[in-house]
């Protein structure tokens, strides 16, 4: 009987391991790059400005004259007190590489379903590749690329 119990226990452990591997999260958004996700966000995307300072159409490609870009992150299980940081970077644009543009800190409130960061520049964007990194409680969670062309 002990041999059968050992086989049963081993089979159960294997089943749990396989179940965990098959239940991993898929990409939240096809344009987002995974760091080591905390699972805080259910979706992240970039958006154009609607002309009134609010997020408009979802996109990852902007024109140089789109002076304001928005990054929206929907919270999977909203809770108060989560510290989110948006860090905006030039990846490779206008002769500049890997330069931080700005950081925006935000702490979630009790009713927040989505966190939103935006960046406005005073002149046209240079053409090239940019990214916005999202940190959760100090740890990099996601990075999303966007382009100006």
Image: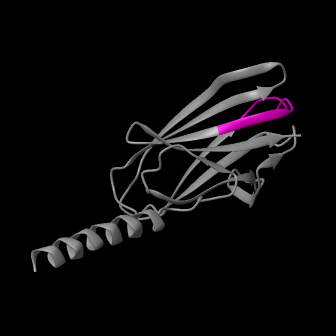
Q: Is residue 45 above or below residue 88?
A: below
Answer with the quarter of the image where residue 87 lies. Answer: top right
State the image quarter where residue 125 is shown: top right
> In which quadrant is the N terminus drawn?
bottom left
Q: Is residue 127 magenta?
A: yes
Q: How many marks?
A: 0
Image quadrant holding the C terminus, namely top right
Residue found at the far left of this picture:
2
Q: Is residue 20 left or right of residue 86?
A: left
Check the image and report above or below for 143 versus 91. below
At 82% from the left and 29% from the top, the residue drawn is: 123
Q: Is residue 21 magenta?
A: no
Q: How far across and down, in percent of the image, does residue 142 sit?
A: 54, 46
- Please say which color scheme the image uses: one colour
Q: As drawn, is 72 to the left or to the right of 79?
A: right
Say if 54 sits above or below 14 in the image.
above
Can you say whether 106 is above or below 100 in the image?
below
Magenta residue span: 120-131
Looking at this view, is 109 or 97 the one in front? 97
Q: Position of residue 119 (x, y in %)?
A: 66, 38
Q: Position of residue 22 (x, y in %)?
A: 47, 67
Rendered residue at 87%/37% (across/down): 64
Residue 120 spot, x, y in % from top left = 70, 37
Picture residue at 50% right of the left edge, 62% below the top: 25
Foreground: 72 or 22? 22
């Amino acid at each position: 009987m002990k041999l059968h119990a050992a086989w049963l226990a081993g089979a159960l452990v294997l089943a749990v391991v396989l179940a965990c591997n098959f239940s991993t999260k898929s990409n939240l958004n096809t344009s987002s790059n995974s760091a080591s996700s905390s699972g805080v966000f259910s979706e992240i995307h970039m958006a154009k400005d609607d002309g009134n300072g609010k997020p408009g159409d979802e996109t990852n490609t902007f024109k140089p004259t789109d002076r304001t870009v928005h990054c929206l992150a929907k919270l999977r299980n909203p809770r108060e007190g989560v510290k989110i940081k948006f860090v905006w970077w030039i990846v490779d644009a206008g002769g500049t590489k890997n330069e931080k543009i700005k950081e925006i800190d935000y702490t979630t409130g009790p009713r927040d379903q989505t966190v939103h960061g935006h960046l406005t520049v005073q002149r046209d964007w240079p053409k090239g590749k940019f990214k916005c990194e999202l940190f959760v409680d100090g740890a990099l969670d996601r990075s999303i690329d966007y382009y100006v062309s």
